[in-house]
Amino acid sequence: WLTKLLQHYDERRQTETFFKFDAWFHFARGGAETNTIHAYHMAIRQDRRHERLTMEQKLFHSLHTERIQSPSIKEFKEAYGFVNATRNSLGKGEKRMQFVLDIAGGHGGLAALFLVLVPDCESAVVIDPALCESGKRGVDTAWKPFWEHSKTKKSLRYRHECLRTGLRDELAILEQKGVEPSNITVVACHACQHLTDETLEISADYGVNVAVLSCCQKDHDGSWKGLTRRLVKGNAALSIGSLMDLLTAGKMMAWSTGLSAGVEYSVKMKLLDEKITLQNRLIVCKALARGHRELDTKREEAHIKLTRA
């Protein structure tokens, strides 16, 4: 803050504007002896008298006030960006995120933010064999008050089980209850390649929406590694991670994907802020009924053009 202050008055020596800022600093325990800042948030404003905190600032402030380190600030920013990008891609008024299933969600921070930020989200289930007790307490302490006082009754639940059985069972339970597949969204943040593939495969079997932010991408059979090397030599920068994400998105657009569930997928790739994470390619797959007008119309238009030719 001191460098910002000096810079302000350096640039505005001839004016009488005041330097005002709002900041939160997350210090390590130990005070002056330790003097370590884990994270900080700083917003510079000319006048704060009539300004209200944004939801992002409120959620950050809750972590800071309670001295919570799990979820971390980085995890919070990733999850916040993930939820907003998914919500914008799937549509805000269609109730597509009424039921959220978070794969390998650990402490449940991502699932919790769906409950907070999506008004129609009623239930979020974290499916992960790992136990993250300190993180779960952090999520509960910092963010539960935000969804507890909402107009819609909301719940966050943990299921400590592998996705191969846990995800299929949760989807089957919702199916038995008569929940429309279009009202369900499966999510996975920083899922490795095989976890990404299995999450998408199971989701497509049930015809539900799905969004994944992949990491640790791998070309398991090695068929694409040679191409990426040649592209780099030819100054066409395309990493193996970018290529595998594009191929993954392509699989979800394939003719057979979702066929058994009577759906096809409209797929978008959104980029989160690379300052938060370099693994920032979010694949959002929106389930639509087979022959959906939006996709079918485009095909018909293309067919008519071909017949004219």
Image (cartoon, rainbow, N blue to C red):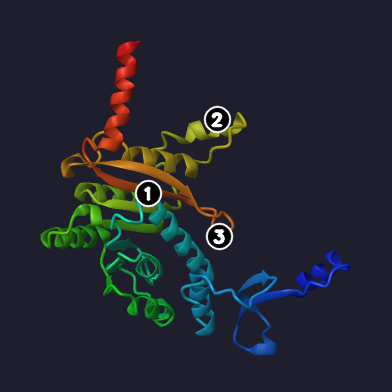
Residue 185's x, y, as percent?
29, 56
Mark 2 residue element = helix
277 on left or right of 160: right
Q: Earlier in the sequence, mark 1 or mark 2?
A: 2
What residue is rendered at 33% in x and 41% in y? Answer: 266
Mark 1 residue element = strand
Q: Earlier in the sequence, mark 3 or mark 1?
A: 3
- Residue type indicated by callout 2: Arg
Q: Earlier in the sequence, mark 3 or mark 2?
A: 2
- Which mark, by number, is residue 284? 1
- Which mark, by number, is residue 230? 2
- Which mark, by number, is residue 111? none
- Which mark, by number, is residue 276? 3
Q: Nearer the viewer, mark 3 or mark 2?
A: 3
| In the image, farthest residue toward the right | 14
Residue 75's x, y, as percent?
48, 67
